[in-house]
Amino acid sequence: AMRLKGQRLFSGMYVNELLTRLLMNHVEHKQLYLAYQDTLAALQGESGIQLLLRQFELCLLSELGYRIDWFCDSEGDEIQPECTYRFEVGCGFCPVLLAEKAGALGPVITGAQVTAVADWLAVGQAAPTLDWTPIKQITRAALNQLTAGRTLHSRDIYRQLKKT
């Protein structure tokens, strides 16, 4: 039995809900099931929750055929660490012009953050120390497309309990 408490319990509920909402019955996903087991086991420990959830979300997206290209921008050019990008669902990382920075519609992320995630995913290095908020916004945008924008109940429950 898994022993999850507090935010880790809600994180486990979130992972479960993603699977029940996005997977078809009787379709085998061995890699995803292993990632699910690893995530739940890791949630019992001291590992950073944000990192564990992003890692699981990226595995889920990949398993469902939704691939985020962390190496090239929407125009096919290599991601430049000194540039800023806006993530657009279905397009990928679009270079942000200086005039667009204030009014960007999708999550904004630096090229350095994108390349750090790319290296982490490709080489299997230790997770980079960075602000995971933009990556959370990116995975959330991609997952929202797959859930057809339906609200996840685990998020709502967590938000309500945080308010009290």
Image: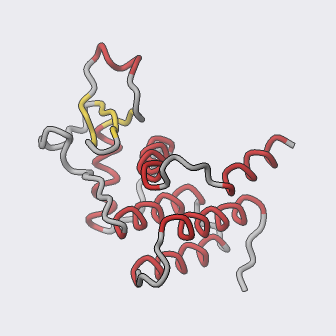
| Residue 11 rendering spot, x and y as whole percentages | 65, 62
| Residue 59 rendering spot, x and y as whole percentages | 40, 67
Query: Going by the image, does 15 lie left or right of 159?
Result: left
Examine the image and state in which quarter residue 118 appears. bottom left
| Residue 52 rendering spot, x and y as whole percentages | 53, 63
Examine the image and state in which quarter residue 43 appears. bottom right
Residue at screen point 46% across, 53% down? 143
Residue lying furthest top: 99
| Residue 15 rendering spot, x and y as whole percentages | 58, 66
Q: How many marks?
A: 0
Work out whether 26 lies above or below 131.
Answer: below
Residue at screen point 25% across, 31% down? 83
Q: Quick one: quadrant of the N terminus?
A: bottom right
Residue lying furthest right: 164
Colour option used: secondary structure
Q: Quick one: quadrant of the C terminus?
A: top right
Work out whether 154 lies above or below 73.
Answer: below
Q: Nearer the viewer, residue 27 or 42?
A: 27
Query: Going by the image, does 98 lie left or right of 72?
Result: right
Query: Going by the image, does 124 lie left or right of 28?
Result: left
Work out whether 38 lies above or below 118.
Answer: below
Residue at screen point 40% across, 33% down? 106
Examine the image and state in which quarter residue 86 appears. top left
Residue at screen point 43% across, 76% down? 32
